[in-house]
Image: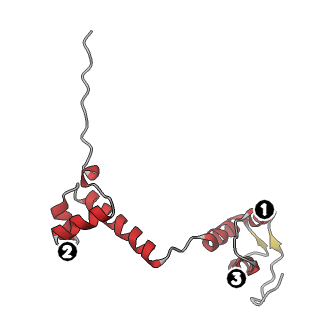
């Protein structure tokens, strides 16, 4: 197989071909063509290995979120990370974020994050019954 990359590629290994055939490529032939082009460009051997096929297919099928949805996901993860790193101390978390505490509370409500859920778990000492 020689495409515009002018590389001699014999094709995919049998395991790689099985991955390609069973891949969920919901796009049209253009998406399939993009996968093949990327495989040829990245191939270092004449036979395309299954690992490379898996990597290229995973990259091709990764979901790209709309901007607002991606921003919302980032905000939620960021807030959760702040709460974890401060042991759920909202005042400290808001200072770290350089955000007013009242606005920080509104953000937590908007993302339905309860600071109590981020408090560290305390170890319980169970007593054994002497009987």
- Quote the CA–CA distance across marks 3 and 2: 45 Å
Residue corresponding to mark 3: 41
Q: Earlier in the sequence, mark 2 or mark 1?
A: 1
Q: Earlier in the sequence, mark 3 or mark 2?
A: 3
State the quadrant of the C terminus: top left
| Image location (x, y in percent) of residue 36 | 74, 78
Residue 23, image quadrant: bottom right
| Image location (x, y in percent) of residue 80 | 32, 61
Query: Would residue 41 be found to the left or right of residue 96 on screen?
Result: right
Please tell me the numbered disc located at residue 18: 1
| Image location (x, y in percent) of residue 61 | 63, 70
Marks 3, 2: nearer the viewer: 2
Residue at disc 1, secondary structure: helix
State the quadrant of the N terminus: bottom right
- Quote the CA–CA distance across marks 3 and 1: 20 Å
Are there few (<14), some (14-19), or many (20+) residues within 10 Å of tag 2? Answer: few
Q: Nearer the viewer, residue 125 or 74?
A: 74
Q: Is residue 58 above or below residue 124?
A: below
Marks 2, 1: nearer the viewer: 2
Please tell me the numbered disc located at residue 78: none
Q: Nearer the viewer, residue 114 or 53?
A: 114
Residue at disc 2, secondary structure: loop
Query: Would residue 40 be found to the left or right of residue 78 on screen?
Result: right
Q: Nearer the viewer, residue 125 or 11?
A: 125
Residue corresponding to mark 2: 98
């Amino acid at each position: 197989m020689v495409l515009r990359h002018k590389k001699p590629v014999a094709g995919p290994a049998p395991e790689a071909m099985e991955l390609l055939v069973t891949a969920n490529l919901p796009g049209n032939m253009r998406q399939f063509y993009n996968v093949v082009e990327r495989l040829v460009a990245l191939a270092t051997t004449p036979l395309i290995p299954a690992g490379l096929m898996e990597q290229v297919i995973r990259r091709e099928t990764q979901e790209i979120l709309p901007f607002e949805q991606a921003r919302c996901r980032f905000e939620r993860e960021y807030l959760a990370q702040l709460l974890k790193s401060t042991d759920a101390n909202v005042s400290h978390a808001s200072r770290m974020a350089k955000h007013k505490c009242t606005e920080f509370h509104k953000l937590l409500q908007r993302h339905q994050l309860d600071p109590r859920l981020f408090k560290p778990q305390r170890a319980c000492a169970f007593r054994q019954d002497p009987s």
